[in-house]
Amino acid sequence: MAGATDSAIWFFGGDGATEGPPPEELLGGKGAGLVRMSRLGLPVPPGFIITTEAARALREDGAPPPELERAIDAALDGLQAASGRRLGDAQRPLLLAVRSGAAQSMPGMMETLLDVGINPATAAAMAGDDETDGRFAWDCLRRFAQGYGQAVRGLPAHLFDEEWETWCERAGGDDAALSADDLRDMALRYLELIHRETGRPLPSDPRRQLKEAIIAVARSWESEKARAWRALHDVADDVGTAVIVQAMVFGNRDAASASGVAFSRDPSTGQQVMFGEYLPAAQGIDVVEGLRTPLPISEAMRRASGLDVTPLERLMPDAFAELRAHLRQVEAHHQAVQEVEFAIERGRLWLLQTRDARLSAAATVRVLRDMAAEGLIGRRDAIARLDPVTLERLLHARVDEERAAPPIARGLPASPGAVCGQAAFSVGEALRLKVLERDVVLIRPETSPDDVRGIHAARGVLTSRGGMTSHAAVIARGLNMPCVTAADIAIDEDRGEMTASGVTIRRGDWITIDGASGRVYAGRAPLRPVNIDAPLATLLGWADEVRRLRVRANADTAGDIAAARDLKAEGVGLLRIEWMFLDDDGAALMQRMILAADADERQSAAARLRRLIAGQLEGVLRAGAARPLTLRLLDLPLAAFLPADARSEERCAAALGVTVAALHERLERLQVESLRLGLRGARLYLDQPWVLQTQLAAIFDALAAVADHGPPPELEILVPMVMGGREFAQLRGRIDATATRMLPDALRDSLPVGAMIELPRAAIRAAAIAAHADFLSFGTNDLTRAALGLRREEAAEIAGLYVENALMNGDPFMTLDEHGVGALMRYACGTARRARPDIVLAVCGDHAADPASIAAFAAMDMDYISCAPPRLPVARLAAARAAV
């Protein structure tokens, strides 16, 4: 078999199975999983895989080339021999499932055809005179007709759904009450519908059916919904899909049959418990499409749900025990949580596919910790597998149930996290609200692959049907998006509203869902942040052990410093003193100093400002005790403190005790316009030395006061807006002289002074600056603006223009522009290190919280990064991943 098919087709599950490592880029994730399971000796129906390369010809030409057609015929012969059945045989018919299989799972985005090979004559032979066999046989023909009509002929689903609903209504609304005759008549109606709508009958030749099914599945890679999914997930369009042809197993055969989906661990929580859902006497598509509410697989899940139903564990205990053992085996082989589709036919278990499960962020963290503890993977593997984006999404909110009103509905907690958003009842509504930058909760009876763009536009998903493994749940977990399924709500799609507990939510109304509890609230419920739990704390502890790049926090208050300490920050990398100048008292005193009529008036205001700032700083410095704390000097132009309109001029004049005309005279003498033209930071201190001296006096007063009553912080002074070495040397001299005059030796001798690198010239002259500095801290926000020639107010808009026109890979204010700003930084780091090998290098801009940028900073041999406290866990993890 292997020799006949070469690389175009892989055979599995029988004699002559293709040998060699199964390459996912050729077989897709699903196909490679089937090959691995069959080699483990697990019960996998035999089949063959048309590789992604071979399937490309099907997409492009719409027909298999002669050599591929011969290979498919040979593979079909092998499949018939392995199964003991033959395509089109009336006594032992072989029916086939034809599925897609991309390298990256694209759930529900491409076509699947089941029961390929059946026709009315085969169905009649399968039915015989037995009612159970008859229901099964005609149901298979009905399912194939609908799948063929939609996937091959392009008919809309509603044509078949309307027929189905009509027949179910005749049977009292219960499809289980449909007789074999009902299902036969319905299947024949489906065949008539296809002929009527397309002008061509469904072919009765099984081999022609198979050929058309293979082509339809291969070409579904190009469907609109598949393209949209790839664009949203950054998957290349030229990768392609494999096509899997596999012998059918019938979970819908009789009462001793079932289909379901099982996970080796709970995909929402990560608990090491078997998790899943099933439906008796059903095919797998009934479970995953959420058309019927599935049942819990285990007794533990049934108890947790409170439902009075029969779990698979009680209905078919032997098959359940076998499934649990197989799940453990598959997980151990893949070293990852597995999602397995299974079918039970007349009591015999079959595994139909496996793939790495899509887990919630919380489950991902717990699983990695547990697998490392179990010895399945190493600690460094666990760190490398935890994507910082997943960690970001884990830090979601929960509804504060103590302050929230009672929920209006409850459903299944399909994907954790809580979100408030405006209700949208269609994809179009969700997209319109998204354009208006509104938060959206998409509300649907159930979701389908056609809803994927609406799901991506939303911040949460709520459905009235489906289960824990339905389409909505799987997609939402993959996006780490809150999701509640099977909620007790009534949805009117035409009116655009839902009702629950007597409350009506209309399109645009606010609604809150909590995907961890399954609760639904009207309006905007109060949310509370998630604390770092034990699994995450463990993983972050492992990350801290391996990372070289230290992580500090940007902080402005004692509360910020306390929060950063709780999140394991290694000190404060940026404390901006200007916030103390900008409160009402500080700003008024700065105005008085700037506009003073003489030296005495300025000195009086400076003394008062010194006491005010020192008092505020004491609490902040005390909170940072015994840890590094980098205090950046004032980085505002003096114009920021001056009155900007008539009303503020009147207030300022009154505070100074002068007329508005006299105030205008003082402003003119100051040449205010010149103060607005970049005269800030180091330049301001050279031009107006009193601004520097007032700050230093307040800082050193506060430091000495803290040191008198306990351990002070390891204070570091950061000078902003430095442009060159001689400039910094002058300012450093003034700082050191003031420290010598005001501080005792113990504090003065351990006072590092550094320069902020936020100008391209400073980066180019980094070696000259480093000769006089103890550390350099890159302010990447301003450095990016300066390097790109942008003012603050236009930066985002102009950068967006470059991204939209594919001139930049991403927003340079979110992720470092490595070719431009990154090149400046690499040059600066290299020259500074050569000039002074012990120089400390740091980053304190917004990029210090971006995982991709952090990897670049680690490659530059930075010593530490500093970010906002809520971003510390992400920064710690990203720094560790850069090391492993």
Image: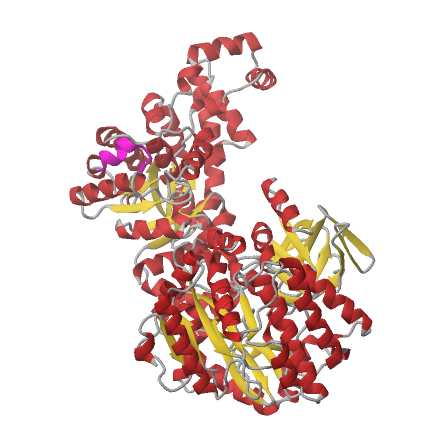
Write the residue at 19% across / 41% down.
831
Q: Is residue 373 above or below residue 625?
A: below
- Position in image of residue 22 (x %, y %): 35, 74
Q: Could you say which is closer to the camera, residue 585 or residue 615?
A: 585
Q: How is the image coloured?
A: secondary structure
Instruction: Tell me, yes or no, if residue 281 can be seen here.
Output: no
Instruction: Tell me, yes or no, if residue 581 can be seen here.
Output: yes
Q: Could you say which is closer to the camera, residue 9 or residue 101?
A: 9
- Position in image of residue 683 (x %, y %): 33, 25
Give the residue furthest to the left. Answer: 834
First to last magenta residue range: 755-766
Image quarter hosting the N terminus: bottom left
Tell me, yes or no, whether the highlighted magenta stretch contains residue 112.
no
Q: Horizontal placement of 397 versus 238: left or right?
A: right
Q: Is residue 863 above or below residue 722?
A: below
Residue 529 image-quadrant placement: bottom right
Write the residue at 35% across / 60% down.
881
Write the residue at 75% across / 66% down.
165
Q: Horizontal placement of 14 versus 271: left or right?
A: left
Image quarter hosting the C terminus: bottom left
- Position in image of residue 272 (x %, y %): 52, 78
Q: Could you say which is closer to the camera, residue 168 or residue 670?
A: 168
- Position in image of residue 826 (x %, y %): 25, 43
